[in-house]
Image (tube, rainbow, N blue to C red):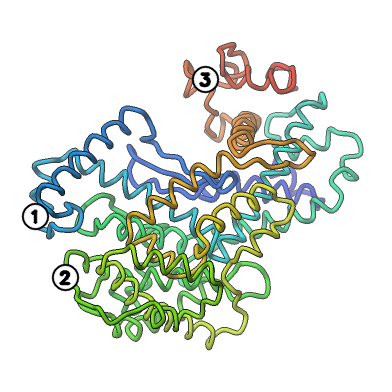
Amino acid sequence: MNKMREEKPMGLLEQFVDAYLQLRNPVSQLHKLNASFDANMSGAFNLFGLDTHFSFQNNSFIAWIEREGEFLEREAESSGEDIYRSLDDSELEAYLKKNPAMLDMFRARELAAHEHFHVLQALTLRSVFSLAQAYRTIGQWRNYFGVMVLHSGATFKQGECIFDALRNIPDYENLLGSTLHDLSKKANLALNVTKIHAQGLSMLDLIEGSAFFAQKIAVRTFAVPTFNVADNPIYSGAWQVYQTMGGRDEMTFLLVCLAALRFGDIKRGYAHPVDIFLSLAQEATTFESTWFEPPSLAKCFGFTINSNEDNDEKYFAHLHITNQRQIDSLALYRRQATEEVNHAVDEALKISKKIAEYVKAKFESVGAPVDENQVSASYIDDFLRAFGMGIYEQFPAVNTEEFCLRFLFDTDIYNEFSHFAIDAAGEVGVQEIGGNMLNGDEARALHSILNRFESLALYDPDEQSPLPYCCDIHPNPGDFDQVIECQQEGSLNAVIREICGRELHELFN
């Protein structure tokens, strides 16, 4: 199919489909933002549904996590210490030798922190928000056209995606109208996230590199050998470049990545996030020289810090926050947090402020951080608008740098945000394109079904492309015919029959 397109000038639909198929290619790493560090444990943040998924999300593992968590809480209460914060490296190593199963708990906690940090990135960092908008727009129209095509009586040739099949509908060009131009722009914007921009880095390297260090900081596991990412450039490439430029501190690296993603964008007219990152990395030693000892913020927990001089008025004076709801929210967090957490946030904000000042002085074409007005104006996207506004209502300061830091340093804030985001993503009710009323779970379910169907339609045995999940009996089907002939309840064939009244074998010619 691609070879045929190369032999003649491509029309707008063909150009879009070509970009869309690249987005579907697992190599692009963009269909989901993954954290697949270990073959047995992985997580993913779905850019369409803004929801998280984990390979260990089953009842037995969750029950084990809860039992182990209760055990640790009892141990902490009896000793007056927190196992995650109080053990030094050698003690932790000895502890894990006695309790090897605990390593999986650390991994699970890290993966959860990684994926929920992606949720925070998508709602607050300008460039990641643009990416989420692009995927949401493409996904919404794919849902709409997918149901239309399945109900139209149209058939598919092997190797055609849903957008390809629109050509089987009469007058499809008028049906698409200006939508196709917008979809093409969104697809190309999303593809730019994975393109190497400079120094071997893409924007995706900044997204995933920062999320990896966020998980280590949030779970306090720098001394725990959970995942090896040294040979996986998506997670380690940006950190390695940062180190070659003299950087040594993990927390400063994270702040640099966040600034690059917050002020930069892949839209035309803005500084590219990688350019901002590299410029900041060249000044790494300047930013890190203002840091307190020990050099890594992640290792400061467990030290007694005496500081009674701060008050709310002084605390907010340098943050330039005028929204009273945000001030009240942050002041409440501050009063409820431990002295160690408040000190850590204050120190990080000093560095973050210097980084922001440098970016604004160095680059003219930077954007403002995402705010609730930008979220509420989300184009044609009731779900993103409703989900985002729910988050901003519950957490008025969610788009501030301080909230991001408290998400990392304060377990209570992290837990509250993560649980709310999970519930809100599933329950919010929205009107989809075409007028159908769905909640988040229903829209994601339709998206998942169409993903499975499209994977089947694009299946090519010669290229060893994967077949989709069929049913509980055939989770990894052996061939195409097994999927289209399966009559098991819940199979792809049964689900498609329920949607459009046709068997899978009737959809392919």
Between discs 2 and 3, the one toward the N terminus: 2
Residue 235 relative to residue 167: left or right: left
Whether residue 224 is situated above or below residue 317 in the rendered picture: above
Check the picture and name the quadrant holding the C terminus. top right
- The picture quadrant where one finds residue 505 is top right
**Can you tell which mark lies on residue 91?**
1
Q: Name the residue under label 3.
A: 471
Q: Name the residue under label 2.
A: 304
Q: What element carries label 2?
A: loop
Viewer-nearest residue: 51 or 373: 373
Whether residue 327 is situated above or below residue 42 in the rendered picture: below
State the separation of the CA atoms marked 3 and 1: 46 Å
The amino acid sitting under disc 1 is Glu
Viewer-nearest residue: 344 or 475: 344
The amino acid sitting under disc 3 is Cys
Query: Percent x, y for residue 334?
Result: 36, 68
State the separation of the CA atoms marked 2 and 1: 19 Å
Viewer-nearest residue: 494 or 299: 299
Report the residue at 90% width, 45% height from top. 174
Query: Percent x, y for residue 319?
Result: 46, 79
Check the picture and name the quadrant holding the N terminus. top right
Q: How crowded is mark 2: few (under 14 residues within 10 Å), some or many (20 or more)?
A: few
Q: Can you tell which of label 2 and label 3 is closer to the viewer?
A: 2
Q: Can you tell which of label 3 and label 1 is closer to the viewer?
A: 1
**Can you tell which mark lies on residue 78?**
none
